[in-house]
Image (spheres, helix red, strand yellow):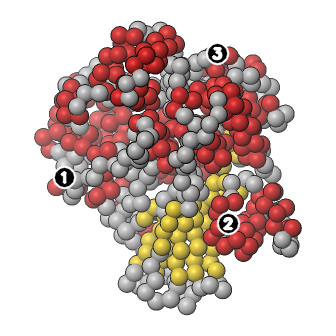
């Protein structure tokens, strides 16, 4: 067995397996995993509650059985050489390159998908040709007789059927499951802490730990920004005033970002779009400094429960398309009242979202020079036209439901989990995600849309479930800052020359007609916009640095012995 991760319900599984005659010689969840496979075979995956990537060699059946957890918290990369009948797997792409089973050559189609749609982590392809990513909630079987090929199949999916319950009942059930999810993720023989941003999700985790009576000796780790518009310090302080925990914080700085950027890209391997990833990198370093090994985090609630503004627009679109105009009117009014806006502003946003795609694209391009994909030199990169991501929309289900399913299983959450895993592992920390308990996900996706986005609120059922244990100001908070470092100020100020130099290094990769325009425009503007120009620049710089790190990897000099299990 090769195993990366944690089986959170190993205590319960150990008890069940002991009743079936299994004898245990340790308290390790690794031994429980092996016994679970011995007892139930591939069906053991249905019983596991955890984050994991593992491979088991079954000598009796002459087969390799591998699997990845339901949401893909832990990575699993592999290379299959059919001609040589050679299979290799690892947690990092670099390891496979150094093993000598693949060359550091770019996969053109994967790169095209990234620059066109910012889609990468939800795909089985990686930026390196021949290296595959085992999808989340998937298993792999490789029977060893000659001519065998790996068989990948999905072992878990989100439910599609709705359950009949009112909001109060749903909130109570969510609260019960969330409490148990946090409880089993606190199991550890090393110090456990939490990240705390001041947002609803991380606050729920910290306050739930306090509610369980497990806050004694706990530490929280936060990033505070030195620009008021981005700082969530006042919300962090509200939480700290409510729970008795040790509090530690760090303020990301521009010069440190510059110095650590290539190191961070080396760990990430594949690109990232924003400095929020760097803020998390620094928070994990802070946890390491205070010798806290396990960190509970708040990732996943936004994608499952509709925590971003565009989910509100999806909900309103659904109401409009279905002719539920009185309900739409109430939603718009509630949304505007909660955020201090006007119904007219809300209506304008909705009207814009409902424009035909061609008109919307032309209007969007008025405010940006080119699409990100147009910045690149297709001849140098060998780009191919990328395929549009496949929608998960099902007949009878809403646009909101389709968006939440996509974002939770194949879209943004996959990338966010990679960032979190790489940032934590860079400092030998273990990140655990209570919101990604599959029992919570199964409940959430069986609830009606209005329990997720409704009455002007995002994450409605979570707010109701946590209302009695978190500060009221946070339960009623409706702004979202996104853990962003002051990217615009950094790139407009002390990091201007560094960014300019990075763009110069990328000149050959950029479209020649665009390169001069992009570089000159960057040098000329007084202020870099955080979200438009800033994100595009981070994507370029991280892509260039990450590819350089991978392409500089060389096979180990000594001969690697390949074991023939035949």
Give the percent coordinates (x, y) of residue 99. Answer: 47, 73
Query: Distance from label 2 to label 3 (Cα)?
Result: 43 Å
Tell me what residue is drawn at x 43 percent, y 37 percent: 398
User: Which residue corresponds to the image point at 73% horizontal and 29% vertical from the top-left?
Assistant: 207
Residue 237 in percent (x, y) is at 68, 19
Q: Residue at x 53, y 82 (%)?
A: 143
Disc 3 on helix, strand or loop?
helix
Task: Classify residue 137 by image quadrant.
Answer: bottom right
Q: Which mark is residue 49?
A: none
Instruction: Give the residue at mark 2.
Output: 44
Q: How far across and down, in percent of the image, does residue 400 sit?
A: 44, 35
Mark 2 residue crowding within 10 angstroms, few (<14) / some (14–19) / many (20+): some
Closer to the camera in the image, 489 or 193:
193
Q: Quadrant of residue 382?
A: bottom left
Q: Secondary structure at mark 2?
A: helix
Taking 345 as reference, is 305 above or below it?
below
Q: Residues within 10 Å of mark 3 (few under 14, many from 20)?
A: few
x and y percentages locating residue 55 in the rendered image? 60, 70
Q: Is residue 433 above or below residue 548?
A: above
Which tag is nearer the camera, tag 2 or tag 3? 2
**Which residue shows up at 84% across the image and 33% down it?**
213
- Which mark identifies residue 473? 3
Q: Which mark is in front, 2 or 1?
A: 2
Disc number lying in front (3 or 1): 3
**Label 3 vs label 1: CA separation?**
50 Å
State the mark number for residue 378: 1
Q: CA distance from mark 2 to mark 1?
A: 46 Å
First in residue order: circle 3 vs circle 1: 1
The answer to which of 286 and 369 lies nearer the viewer is 369
Q: Residues within 10 Å of mark 1 (few under 14, many from 20)?
A: some
């Amino acid at each position: 067995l090769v195993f990366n991760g944690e089986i959170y319900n190993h205590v319960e599984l150990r008890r069940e397996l002991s009743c079936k005659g299994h004898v245990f010689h340790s308290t390790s969840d690794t031994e429980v995993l092996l016994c679970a496979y011995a007892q139930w075979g591939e069906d053991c995956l249905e019983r596991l509650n955890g984050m994991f990537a593992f491979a088991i060699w079954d000598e009796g059946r002459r087969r390799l059985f591998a699997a990845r957890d339901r949401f893909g918290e832990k990575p699993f990369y592999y290379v299959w050489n059919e001609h040589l009948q050679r299979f290799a797997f690892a947690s990092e792409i670099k390891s496979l390159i150094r093993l000598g089973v693949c060359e550091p050559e770019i996969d053109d189609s994967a790169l095209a998908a990234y620059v066109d749609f910012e889609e990468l982590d939800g795909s089985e392809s990686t930026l390196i040709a021949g290296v595959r990513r085992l999808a989340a909630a998937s298993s792999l079987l490789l029977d060893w007789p000659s001519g065998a090929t790996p068989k990948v199949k999905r072992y878990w999916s989100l439910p599609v059927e709705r359950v009949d319950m009112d909001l109060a009942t749903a909130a109570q059930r969510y609260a019960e499951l969330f409490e148990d999810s946090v409880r089993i993720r606190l199991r550890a023989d090393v110090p456990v802490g939490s990240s705390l941003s001041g947002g609803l999700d991380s606050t729920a985790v910290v306050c739930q730990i306090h509610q369980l009576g497990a806050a004694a000796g706990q530490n929280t780790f936060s990033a505070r920004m030195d620009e008021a518009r981005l700082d969530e310090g006042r919300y962090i302080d509200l939480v700290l005033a409510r729970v008795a925990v040790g509090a530690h914080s760090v303020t990301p700085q521009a010069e440190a970002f510059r110095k650590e950027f290539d190191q961070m890209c080396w760990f990430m391997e594949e690109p990232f779009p924003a400095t929020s990833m760097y803020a998390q990198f620094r928070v994990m370093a802070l946890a390491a400094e205070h010798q806290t090994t396990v960190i509970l985090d708040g990732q996943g609630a936004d994608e499952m429960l509709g925590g971003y503004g565009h989910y509100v627009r999806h909900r309103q679109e659904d109401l409009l398309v279905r002719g539920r105009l009185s309900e739409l009117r109430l939603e718009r009014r509630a949304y505007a009242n909660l955020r201090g806006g006007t119904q007219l502003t809300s209506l304008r946003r909705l009207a814009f979202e409902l424009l035909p795609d061609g008109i919307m694209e032309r209007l969007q391009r008025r405010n940006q020079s080119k699409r990100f994909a147009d910045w690149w030199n297709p001849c140098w990169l060998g780009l191919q036209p990328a395929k549009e991501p496949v929608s998960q929309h099902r007949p009878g289900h809403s646009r909101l439901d389709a968006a939440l399913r996509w974002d939770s299983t194949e879209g943004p959450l996959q990338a966010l989990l990679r960032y979190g895993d790489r940032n934590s592992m860079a400092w030998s920390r273990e990140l655990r995600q209570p919101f990604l308990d599959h029992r919570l996900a199964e409940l959430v996706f069986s609830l009606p849309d209005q329990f997720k986005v409704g009455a002007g609120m995002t994450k409605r059922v979570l707010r109701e479930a946590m209302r009695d244990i978190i500060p009221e100001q946070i339960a009623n908070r409706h702004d979202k800052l996104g853990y962003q470092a002051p990217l615009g100020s950094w790139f407009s100020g002390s990091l201007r020359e560094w960014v300019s130099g990075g763009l110069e290094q990328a000149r050959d990769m950029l479209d020649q007609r665009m390169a001069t325009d992009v570089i000159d425009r960057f040098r000329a503007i007084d202020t870099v916009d955080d979200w438009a120009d800033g994100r595009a620049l981070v994507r370029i710089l991280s892509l260039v640095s990450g590819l350089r790190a991978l392409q500089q990897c060389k096979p180990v000099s000594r001969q690697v012995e390949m074991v023939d299990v035949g």
